[in-house]
Image (cartoon, rainbow, N blue to C red):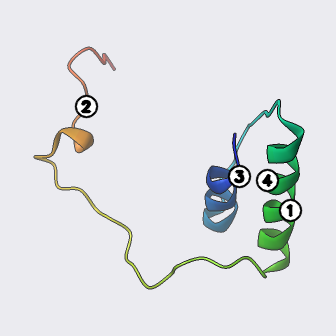
Amino acid sequence: MGSGSAWVATLLEGRYFIWSEQEKEYYSIAKDRCRDTLSGVIQYRDDKPVYEPTWNLSVARKPDNFKF
């Protein structure tokens, strides 16, 4: 999990997140960042819009081996 950046992002976006961390130092950092996010004091950049990839970029296409 590391320092909790993904956790903070999921909280800010109202999504769910499952995580685990083995290092106590990183767990402590992530826990503090989560608490700050929930209390509304976390600092983050909101001046940069969310990147919306176009469908012709490889990151936006469904991989050929995915079968739905």
Which residue is pictured at 73% across the width and 37% down the height? 18
| Residue density around tag 2, few if under 14, some if 14–19, many if 20 or more, within 10 Å | few
Is tag 4's residue or tag 3's residue first in the polypeptide sequence?
Answer: 3
Coordinates of residue 44 in the picture (x, y in percent): 60, 76
What is the total number of numbered labels drawn onto the structure image? 4
Question: From what the image shows, is residue 11 above or below residue 20?
Answer: below
The three-letter code of the residue at mark 2 reads: Lys
Coordinates of residue 54 in the picture (x, y in percent): 17, 55
Q: CA distance from mark 4 to mark 2?
A: 32 Å
Residue behind mark 2 = 62
Q: Quadrant of residue 19?
A: top right
From the viewer's perspective, is 34 left or right of 59? right
Which residue is pictured at 79% across the width and 53% down the height? 30
Are circles 4 and 2 on residues that touch, CB within 8 Å?
Answer: no
Residue behind mark 4 = 30
The three-letter code of the residue at mark 1 reads: Asp
Are circles 1 and 4 on residues that touch, CB within 8 Å?
Answer: yes
Are circles 4 and 3 on residues that touch, CB within 8 Å?
Answer: yes
